[in-house]
Image (cartoon, rainbow, N blue to C red):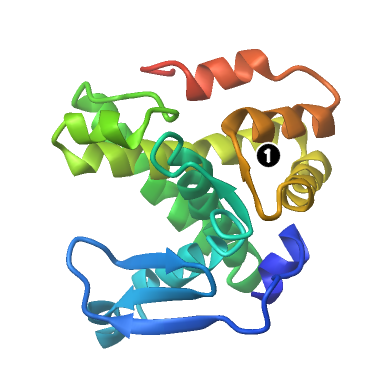
């Protein structure tokens, strides 16, 4: 929470709860002010899956709770950003080897889908992914490819512009429902240039090279 406070802006509530719950088909689920973490992860709390799940769900207090979005029409907007945010936690708390391992996991997951001919648009709706009847595509595209997009965007525009954009987004859209267009526009403002070609490559195209 301290790391996200520093990177995004202050957490808006006096309390945050992390609760162990028996879960099926999910490792964690976010709600305003509280996240539930699968009981199976508590059996091995020293394993990376436990830590990264808590970091991901905690990031949703910024991306989904404070800054709202339509989670059915644009699931990438909170899920991809929360996934990438977990790497920022690792970057500060654990160091580069941990970040590299996390990014490698995203890349492998996405590459496997590409090799199977199942690449898709990050910006598709939940209904679209449900129609594919393959949950691995939703996770590999929205979470992993989406997180890789934010990693590539940071590398393209630099740390100062990237983190300024996240802080500006957090301040501008607290207690509002933001759209993908809103977020992408704030990144362009922070970068001081058009990023349309980059967005087309990562967000609106399949089979990126």
Establish if 137 lies above or below 192.
below
Q: Give the residue furthest to the left.
A: 133
Write down the quadrant of residue 129 in the picture. Answer: top left
Q: Quadrant of the N terminus?
A: bottom right
Q: Position of residue 11 (x, y in %)?
A: 70, 70
* Residue toward you, 117 or 5: 5
The residue at 38%/17% (across/down) is 206
Residue to which mark 1 is pinned: 154
Total number of numbered discs in the rendering: 1
Q: Position of residue 161 (x, y in %)?
A: 81, 39
Q: Give the residue furthest to the front.
A: 176
Q: Quadrant of the C terminus?
A: top left
The residue at 62%/40% (across/down) is 178
Residue 34 horizontal side relative to residue 167, left or right? left
* Residue toward you, 93 or 134: 134
Which secondary structure lies at badge 1? helix
Q: Position of residue 97 (x, y in %)?
A: 53, 61
Number of residues whose C-alpha sits closer than 10 Å to that of mark 1, classed few (under 14), some (14–19) or many (20 or more) = some
Q: Position of residue 76 (x, y in %)?
A: 46, 39
* Residue toward you, 101 or 14: 14
Establish if 72 lies above or below 101.
above
* Residue toward you, 192 or 66: 66
Q: Is residue 124 visible?
A: yes
The residue at 37%/65% (across/down) is 29
Establish if 90 lies above or below 127.
below
Write down the quadrant of residue 62 in the picture. Answer: bottom right
Q: Is residue 45 visible?
A: no
């Amino acid at each position: 929470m301290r790391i996200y406070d520093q990177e995004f802006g202050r957490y808006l509530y006096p309390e945050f709860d992390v609760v162990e719950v028996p879960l099926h088909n999910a490792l964690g689920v976010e709600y305003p002010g509280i996240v539930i973490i699968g009981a199976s992860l508590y059996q091995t709390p020293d394993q990376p899956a436990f830590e990264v799940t808590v970091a991901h769900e905690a990031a949703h207090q910024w991306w989904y709770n404070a800054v709202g979005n339509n989670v059915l029409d644009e699931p990438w907007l909170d899920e991809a950003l929360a996934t990438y945010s977990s790497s920022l936690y690792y970057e500060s708390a654990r160091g580069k080897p941990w970040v590299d391992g996390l990014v490698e996991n995203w890349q492998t997951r996405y590459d496997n889908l590409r090799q199977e001919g199942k690449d898709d648009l990050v910006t598709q709706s939940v209904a679209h992914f449900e129609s594919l009847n393959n949950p691995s595509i939703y996770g590999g595209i929205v979470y992993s490819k989406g997180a890789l997009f934010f990693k590539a965007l940071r590398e393209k525009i630099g740390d100062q512009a990237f983190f300024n954009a996240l802080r500006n987004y957090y301040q501008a859209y607290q207690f509002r429902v933001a759209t993908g267009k809103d977020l992408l526009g704030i990144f362009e403002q922070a970068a001081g240039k058009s990023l349309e070609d980059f967005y087309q490559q990562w967000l609106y195209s399949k089979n990126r090279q």
